[in-house]
Image (cartoon, coloured by chain):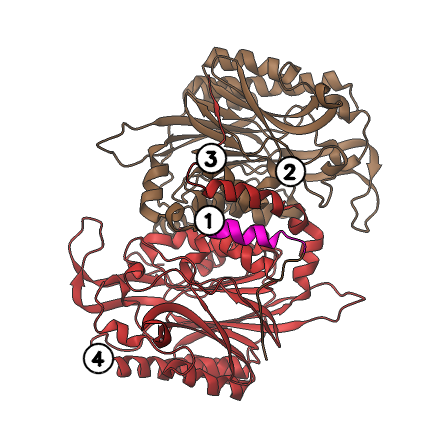
Chain colours: A red, B brown
Amino acid sequence: MAAGLQLESFDKLVSDALSGADLDEFNRIYYGRTSHHELEVKAANLEQAQKNNFDIEAYDFPAQEEDTRSPRIVKIGIIQHCIATSTSKPIQAQRQAIFDKILPIIECAGNEGVNVLCLIEAWSMPFAFCTREKAPWCQFAECAETGPSVQFLQNLAIKYNMVIISPILERDETHGDTIWNTAVVINECGKIIGKHRKNHIPRVGDFNESTYYFEGNTGHPVFDTKYGKIAINICYGRHHPQNWLMFGINGAEIVFNPSATVGGLSEHLWSIEARNAAIANSFFTCAINRVGREEFPNEFTSGDGKPAHKDFGHFFGSSYITAPDGSRTPGLSRIKDGLLIAQVDLNLCRQVKDKWGFRMTQRLDYYAGLIKKAAEIDYKPQVVSGN
Amino acid sequence: MAAGLQLESFDKLVSDALSGADLDEFNRIYYGRTSHHELEVKAANLEQAQKNNFDIEAYDFPAQEEDTRSPRIVKIGIIQHCIATSTSKPIQAQRQAIFDKILPIIECAGNEGVNVLCLIEAWSMPFAFCTREKAPWCQFAECAETGPSVQFLQNLAIKYNMVIISPILERDETHGDTIWNTAVVINECGKIIGKHRKNHIPRVGDFNESTYYFEGNTGHPVFDTKYGKIAINICYGRHHPQNWLMFGINGAEIVFNPSATVGGLSEHLWSIEARNAAIANSFFTCAINRVGREEFPNEFTSGDGKPAHKDFGHFFGSSYITAPDGSRTPGLSRIKDGLLIAQVDLNLCRQVKDKWGFRMTQRLDYYAGLIKKAAEIDYKPQVVSGN
C-alpha cells in the first residue's frame, strides 16, 4: 500500500507479504485452515463482475461423511455494496439507482447457484440515521410485505430459485405507522415467509437509530427453509452474545449479520464478534458490511466535540463467513462492492456440537436462574472482600 | 521461519514481514491501535529473563482523564510456562522443579511493580488429565488454603505487595475428598481471600477433565482487591459467553482466563474468545496458556482413531491481554516461557460502557425470561416454516 491510499484489503495486505511456510502458518492460526479451499467462479460471472466493478470470491467448507445423514450442501451468498447516487436526489431515484447497481451482483449469485442470499442492513437506502433528520429519510421506510425492495427481490428469488434476505427500513401501518429495522425473508418461490426486527439498537457514535425505531418485538425466529435453518442477527445485535445464543437455541444453522459499521469505530472488532458467535454456538455466521463514504445534504454533529460535517465516515466492507469450527473465509474488499460465496455442508454444525460439546456443557438452566436474579432491581452482585 | 521449525510467534511473523504504513494498518485493524504503547522493562529484569530463558513484554493502556475520578493505574502480570522436569519423577520433585523455574519470573513481575499476577491453569503440575489415570496424578491435588503451591506464593505476595491468582488442582477434604479445578486468590498481605472453581468442564480431545472433577459450585465471584475488581474464568469457561457475562454483571474490571490448550484443537480460536469477552462486557481480559509438549509415562488414546501415544501435543502459549475497547497486546511466544505486563487505567471500563452502552442495551430481563423457557424440557423453539 502506498502511503495515503485507502487500504484495499486487510487479507491481501498479509497474503502479499508472506509466502510458503510462513503464509501457511499465518493461515492456519488466523483463518483456522492452511488452505482457503477456493472454488472456481464461472468465467461469464467474472466478466460481469469486472464490467460492473465488483469482486466475486467463493470458498468451500466441507464436512465429514456420515453413515446416517447425506451431506447437506448449501451455497450461501452475501453481497456488500455502496450507495449508487447522491443522497440529495429524490427517494425513488436513490432507491432505483441501488436496484440498478445491485441487479448484476444478484444475477451473478443466481448464476453461481447460490441458494440463500443476504444483503446489507437497510440495503436500499443510505444509512441516514446519523443526521437525526426525519425528513426526507423516513420516506425510505416501506411495507415489509408489499414494498418496492421486496417486490424487486421476489422476482429474482423466483428466477434463481433462491431464498433472499432483504434487510430494510420497515413501515408498519397497522401499528401506528411505526418504523422498524427489519429483515424480510423471501423463499425460493418468491413468498415472504416472515420477518425479523433488530433486537438491539445502538446509541454510539453516528448511529442515532434509537431516534427512529425501537428494539424489535419479533423474538429470535429461525426460518426453516428448503436450504437449511437460517436466522438474522441485525447489525449491533452482534455485540450481544445472548442474541446469538437464542438464535442457536432455536436451531439456526446459518446466522446472517447484515450490518452498517464504520472504520474509526469498530474495524478492530469486526473480525472478532461474528466469528466468536459461530464458535460459541456451532453455526455458520455471515458478517456483511456496507462499503464507502456517504455524504448528506445537511451538516450534523457526532457527539464527539468535533465540528459539524456532512459525511458518515468509511463503511469498511470486509464481509466474511465463519464455519461452526471457527475457520473462516478471507474478507471481501474494504472499498469495493462484492459477492462472497461459501459452499457449506450443514452437517458440520452437528459434527462440531458433538466434538466440542458446548451445548451440553453450557449449563443453561443454571444461567437462566442467575440472569433472572441479575436483572432484578435489588440484585446483590457476588463480591468477595479483598481484605 | 525456516520450513519444519516450530513458529516462535504469530505476532512476529507478521511484524517482521510488514513495515511503514502497511504495518500501521495491520496494527490498527488487527490489534485495535497503530502503536503497541510498549513500556520499558528494567535492565536487571531483562538480564534475569535472558539468564532464565523467558521473555518479558510490557504495554500501556491509558484512559481519558476525568473530572470526578482519579486515574486508577494498575499493573497486571500474567505468566506462561512449561513444566520443568520429567513426569515420571515423584510428585514433590515435579512440583519443586516448577517452583524453582517460576520463582525468577515472579521476582521479575514483583520488581516491575506488578500489582495483580495470574499463573496458568493447574500451574504446579503437568496437564495429566489426558491419561485418565488417577494415580499418581491425583496426588497433585492440594488444599486451597494450606497446600504447598499456595504457601509458596503467599510469601511472594507479601514480599512484592502483589495480589496473586494461583490456579491449582484442589483437594476438598471436608467434602468427601473431592477434587476441583480451582483458582485461589491471595491478597497483597498474603491472605487467601477466596477461591473460584471452574464452571465449565470440557469433554473434547485429550481434555478428559470430567473424569476427575465436576462443574464448579462457587458461582461467579468478583474479588474486590486493593487493585481493582478481579475475577477468574478458568480455561474452557472462555467458550461460554454466559460465564463471562456473569463476571461482568458482578462488577469485574479484569477477568483472568488461566488456560491449558493445544495447537491442533484451538489455536485459531485463541485470539477470538477472550477478546470477544472483553468487548461484550467492557472489562479487561487476560488469556494465559501453558507452553510446550508434555510426555507421560504410559500411553493413552485420544478418541480420534489414531494410535496410542504418550504426549499431549503442543501447548502454544501466545498469552495476551485485551482492553475493554477491544484493543489488545501482541501475544507472548508460542514456544517459550514469558511474563506479559499491562499497565492499565481501570477507568477505561466505565468509559467504554458509556461509549458503547452494551450494558444498557443488553435487555437482561428479556433474556432472563427467554433462557428460562429455553432450559425447560418441553421448550418449543421459535421456528417459522419456509413454505
Label 2 or label 3, whichever comes before in sequence order: 3
| Residue B364 image position (x, y, % from top left) | 46, 48
The answer to whether residue A376 is above or below residue A173 is above
Task: Judge by depth and name the residue closer to the eye, B253 or B14.
Answer: B253
**Could you tell which of marks 1 and 2 lies nearer the N-terminus?**
2
Q: Which is in the foreground here, disc 2 or disc 3?
A: 3
The reply to whether callout 1 and callout 3 are in contact (CB within 8 Å) is no
Label 4, residues with CA under 10 Å away: few <14, some 14-19, many ≥20? few
Q: Residues within 10 Å of mark 1 (few under 14, many from 20)?
A: some
Nearest-to-viewer mark from 1 and 3: 1
Say few, some or many: other residues with alpha carbon within 10 Å of mark 2 (under 14 / 14 to 19 / 20 or more).
Answer: many
Q: Main secondary structure of the magenta part?
A: helix
B286, B55: nearer the viewer: B286
Looking at numbered disc 2 in the image, what kind of residue is underneath it?
Phe
Q: Residue at x 52, y 23 (%)?
A: B50
Mark 4 on the same chain as mark 3: no
> Around disc 3, counting alpha carbons within 10 Å, would you say few (fewer than 14), some (14 to 19), or many (20 or more)?
many
Magenta region: B365-377
- Amino acid at the residue labelled 3: Asn
Residue type at tag 1: Asp
Q: Identify the chain of the residue marked 2, using the numbered disc in the image.
A: B
Q: Which residue is mark 4?
A: A89
The residue that disc 2 covers is B315
